[in-house]
Image (cartoon, grey):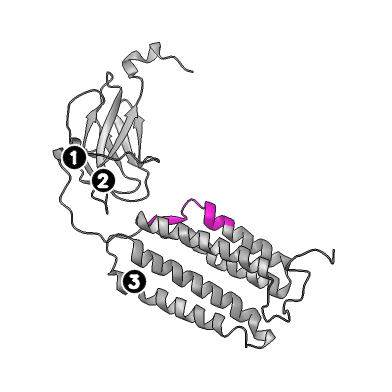
């Protein structure tokens, strides 16, 4: 066992001045870069970290486990990383009333400066202090960097004109992962926003028809926006075989098209299941 290369079978304070091994630092750095890239991609979709923030203490515990030679902390840190990656609410929609970008960047900048300062002081610090400086500095730098990405990459919310009939003839985008879901009932087709963000609505049409209707709520009220988790009711008939819905994300100008097709209830007896 003494010949194995592990962060737990070496002294936490090596003579080269670094408290943990190079391979471990490289692995944790790659994890941090991946997480920051994930935060950046989410920010472009107007999403902010929620349970994804567990990655910050998770990485700090991985460092602390190597410094204190406590494998149990390594397991806790790995569990927090998995939680940040696979939690259902890892990211949530950014609120509509966000302040300006530079106003949002204030506290993240403090975190970046603090983390960089702690890591800069690490080589000359006493060995006993390095166990605290390294995890704290890395966590501050990581959290501040994520905050800066959110402040700089989340698109600003501008007041946009309501979507209208013209979007039916304009170029549309069909997302790889649907923003909407539809449930067909006797009352009609219930349209639900499953994107995790608010959507601006233009109109809808039954499949195969050259029609244009306003999207309305279950009570008949016209809807210009569908909040996350909110439902609308499309009054389809037993002869309709699908719907087409035109919409756009709250912070985007390009129109999106949602398509849903099914076997009409009037022909349900002739449906063939594969």
Q: Secondary structure at mark 2?
A: strand
Left or right of 269 in this view: 206 = left
Q: Which mark is residue 167?
A: 1
What separation in Å lies between label 2 and label 3 (alpha carbons)?
A: 25 Å
Q: Position of residue 58 (x, y in %)?
A: 58, 65
Q: Is residue 52 left or right of residue 165?
A: right
Which residue is labeled 3 in the image?
104
Kindly identify the residue that appears in the image at 51 percent across and 78 percent down. 115
How would you rate the neighbour count of disc 1 (Cα within 10 Å): few for under 14, some for 14-19, many for 20 or more? some
| 136 is higher (above) or lower (below) than 223 | below
Residue drawn at (35%, 34%) of the image: 182
**Highlighted magenta segment, given as a residue range:** 82-93
Which of the marked residues, 2 or 3, is nearer the chain's N terminus? 3
**Residues at marks 2 and 1, CA–CA distance in whole angstroms:** 10 Å
Work out whether residue 240 or residue 56 is closer to the camera in this orientation and state it. Answer: 56
On the image, the x and y values in percent for residue 53 come to 49, 63
SS at badge 1: helix
Res 248 label:
2
């Amino acid at each position: 066992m003494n010949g194995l290369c592990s962060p737990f079978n070496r002294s936490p304070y090596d003579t080269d001045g670094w408290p943990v091994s190079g391979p471990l630092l490289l692995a944790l750095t790659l994890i941090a870069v991946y997480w920051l890239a994930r935060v950046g991609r989410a920010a472009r979709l107007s999403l902010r970290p929620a349970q994804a923030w567990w990655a910050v203490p998770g990485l700090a515990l991985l460092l602390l486990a190597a410094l204190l030679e406590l494998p149990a902390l390594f397991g806790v840190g790995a569990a927090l990383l998995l939680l940040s990656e696979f939690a259902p609410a890892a990211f949530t929609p950014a609120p509509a009333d966000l302040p300006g970008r530079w106003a949002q960047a204030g506290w993240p900048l403090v975190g970046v400066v603090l983390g960089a300062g702690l890591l800069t002081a690490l080589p000359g610090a006493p060995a006993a202090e390095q166990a605290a400086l390294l995890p704290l500095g890395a966590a501050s730098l990581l959290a501040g960097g994520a905050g800066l990405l959110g402040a700089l990459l989340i698109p600003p919310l501008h007041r946009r004109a309501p979507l209208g009939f013209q979007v039916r003839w304009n170029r549309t985008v069909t997302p790889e992962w649907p923003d909407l879901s539809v449930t067909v009932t006797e009352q009609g087709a219930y349209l639900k926003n499953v994107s995790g963000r608010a959507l601006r609505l233009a109109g809808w049409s039954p499949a195969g028809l050259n029609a244009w209707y306003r999207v309305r709520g279950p009570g008949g009220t016209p809807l210009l926006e569908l909040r996350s988790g909110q439902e609308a009711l499309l009054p389809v008939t037993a002869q309709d075989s699908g719907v087409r819905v035109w919409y756009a994300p709250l912070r985007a100008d390009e129109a999106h098209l949602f398509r849903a097709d099914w076997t009409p209830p009037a022909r349900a007896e002739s449906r063939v299941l594969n």
